[in-house]
Image: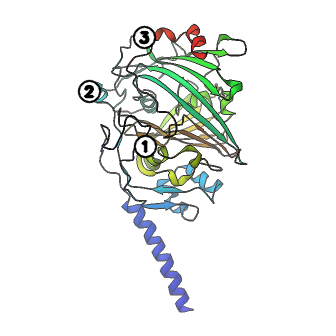
Amino acid sequence: MNKLFIFLYFIIFINSAYADFDLNDLKIGDKEPINEPIDIYDPNKNSYPDPFSGDQILFSIDQSNYLEYADQLLTPGQIEMFKTYPETFKMHVYQSRRSCAVPQEVIQLTTQNAELTDEGEGIIGVVGSIPFPNPSEALHHVWNHILRYRGVNIYGSSPFYIINPDNSITYGAGEAIAINYWNPFVINKKGLQGMLMSKVTHPPRLADASLLVIESLNALKTPRRAWVYNPGTRRVRRAPDIAYDYKPSSSQGITTTDQFDGFNGAKDRYDWTLVGKQQRLMPYNAYKLHETEIDKILTKHHIDQDYLRYELVNVNVVQADLKKDKRHILPHRRMYFDIDSHNMLVEETYDKENQIMAYREFPIINFYDQPMCLSVHSATYDLASRRYQLSSVRSIDVPKIQWRLEEPHDETKFTPEGLKRFAR
């Protein structure tokens, strides 16, 4: 009996000490931005080799030990994923690598905070800079995310997937061109964030269903303008409803329009609160994920977590709560913004009773040929239906997106008539 007691005590003591050691040894170091392509990068291939391929997993979190890390390292959404998928959900934790960078031209323009106008719906500042290098309000972080450097003249295609509880998969694909105006490489006298034209290329029944969006820097004075082209009628019509909680048919009810790219569009339906700075485990430096064929990562309930890398990251947490006189199908949202890159890395949505509805992840890499940090996909896990959506997928088996075309787009194409031509 004494031997059994000593054995059990030894096992419990060792396991506790190992957990404490992992937690206490986990640190966030200094910034080490990757400002240029690494040696083995080949611009002719759709590949971003992992600069940290030699890093080993520090420890893993699964159903057996997630409660040990819940209070200090995990978000409520991550905890809910462990509860909902106890047999399969896990997180491999690696050394923190603060690799994110932006072009030097952006840094040179960044000297002071921009100015919020019209209750946060508008912004005035040095075009192409980081708008709020010294953020002190919730909307500073939201605007930093929206106006982070994301290329200039863009062309690319991207698939999307919806995975159902029975493991069946809905596949779709699209093509888009865009101009971003908030960057140092174009002249912006239009008061615009940018212009986008996109079209669905698959499935065939939606092929050539197309969209034109013109986004301003002040959603109050100049609301979003949008048009859609219907291949059935061959007509273009205004689409003022493509905003807020409008749900595109391609999302099958999982995500809203203003959840594209984390968050976009007008902010007037929410009260915004800065919760503050936290250290949390976030999907980061997801090169292994990008370098893996998509069909290998699509598994039942969630992507294959063996391909994801989590790091301890400094994040600014922002809470959005629906105003009493407004409507939106997402009453409460919590957003986690990377302090270094300003990317939203995680979002959680809650119902009126503050019960969690969905957990969203945006694993990022440094596209070091630019350089810039963006997500390799947007993953939305609907906890009620147990479906998940993967959109804006960037992967080794998807043609590389061109972020800075040598020949800029013709701005006159971004019109209703131009949309009709683009769709054909």
Secondary structure type for disc 2: helix
Asked whether residue 82 is in view, the answer is yes
Is residue 184 found left or right of 344 in the rendered image? left
**Label 2 sits on what residue type?**
Gln
Q: Position of residue 323 (x, y in %)?
A: 60, 29
Q: Are marks 2 and 1 in contact (CB under 8 Å)?
A: no
* Disc 2/disc 3 C-alpha distance (Å): 22 Å
Count of all numbered marks drawn on residues in the image: 3
Near mark 1 (Cα within 10 A), the count class, few <14, some 14-19 or many ≥20, is many
Q: Position of residue 149 (x, y in %)?
A: 39, 28
- Which residue shows up at 63% across the image and 60% down it? 87
**Label 1 sits on what residue type?**
Val
Q: Earlier in the sequence, mark 2 or mark 1?
A: 2
In this figure, which residue is indicated by the disc labeled 3? 190
In this view, the residue in front, 312 or 204, is: 204
- Give the number of the mark in front: 3 or 1: 3
Q: Quadrant of residue 207?
A: top right
In this figure, which residue is indicated by the disc labeled 2? 108
In this figure, which residue is indicated by the disc labeled 1? 315
Secondary structure type for disc 3: loop
Near mark 3 (Cα within 10 A), the count class, few <14, some 14-19 or many ≥20, is few
Residue 129 sits above or below residue 423 on the image:
below
* Disc 3/disc 1 C-alpha distance (Å): 33 Å
Asked whether residue 121 is in view, the answer is no
For the N terminus, the image quarter is: bottom right
In this view, the residue in front, 314 or 269, is: 314
Residue 241 sits above or below residue 91 on the image:
above
- Which residue shows up at 65% across the image and 49% down it? 301
Residue 41 sits above or below residue 64 on the image:
above
